[in-house]
Image (cartoon, rainbow, N blue to C red):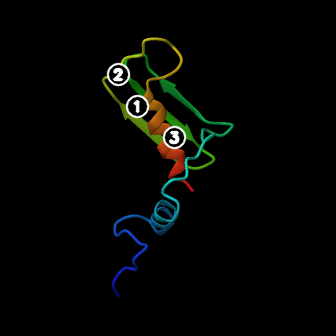
């Protein structure tokens, strides 16, 4: 059976539908739940474990931190993408 028009082969069905149904929707307030833990390094790496969602994320970049906060945009975007993909 060929895929339907609204589906993108290779992606899980919920991701395919949410991505294609609302491409212009911007989600805010996504982030770790209580009980999450991890480490963010000043030289551009971070990892975290979120037991509530069963997610482990690791990112290694070459973007060293200039200040403790905010984190470089690439790391913020990574975590936003991780939690957005859970829907």
Q: Secondary structure at mark 1?
A: helix
Please tell me which residue is depicted at 44% across the width and 20% down the height of the picture: 41
Residue at the disc numbered 2: 63
Give 5 or 78, whichever is nearer the viewer. 5
Please tell me which residue is depicted at 49% across the width and 38% down the height of the picture: 79
Q: Is residue 25 left or right of residue 75?
A: right
- Extreme-bottom residue of the structure: 1
Q: Secondary structure at mark 2?
A: loop
Q: Residues within 10 Å of mark 1 (few under 14, many from 20)?
A: few
Is residue 7 shown above or below 79?
below
Return the disc, 2 or 3, that comes first in the chain's sequence: 2
Question: Where is residue 51 shown, x and y percent of the image?
Answer: 60, 44
Q: Quadrant for residue 8, please give it.
A: bottom left
- Which part of the image, by quadrant, shows the N terminus? bottom left
Please tell me which residue is depicted at 63% across the width and 47% down the height of the picture: 52
- Extreme-top residue of the structure: 67
Question: Where is residue 38 shown, x and y percent of the image?
Answer: 53, 30
Residue at the disc numbered 3: 80
Q: Which mark is residue 74?
A: 1
Question: Where is residue 80 shown, x and y percent of the image?
Answer: 51, 40
Q: Is residue 3 left or right of residue 37?
A: left
Q: Which mark is residue 8?
A: none
Asked if the residues shown at circle 2 and circle 1 are in contact, with their CB atoms under 8 angstroms apart, the answer is yes
Question: Where is residue 17 shown, x and y percent of the image?
Answer: 49, 67
Q: Residues within 10 Å of mark 3 (few under 14, many from 20)?
A: some
**Disc 2 from disc 1: Cα separation:** 8 Å
């Amino acid at each position: 059976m060929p895929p339907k028009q609204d589906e993108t082969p290779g992606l899980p069905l919920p991701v395919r539908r949410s991505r294609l149904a609302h491409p212009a929707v911007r989600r805010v307030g996504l982030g770790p739940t209580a009980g999450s833990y991890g480490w963010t390094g000043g030289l551009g790496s971070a990892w975290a474990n979120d037991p509530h969602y069963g997610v482990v994320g690791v990112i290694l970049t070459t973007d060293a931190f200039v200040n403790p906060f905010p984190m470089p945009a690439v790391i913020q975007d990574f975590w936003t993408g991780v939690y957005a993909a859970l829907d």
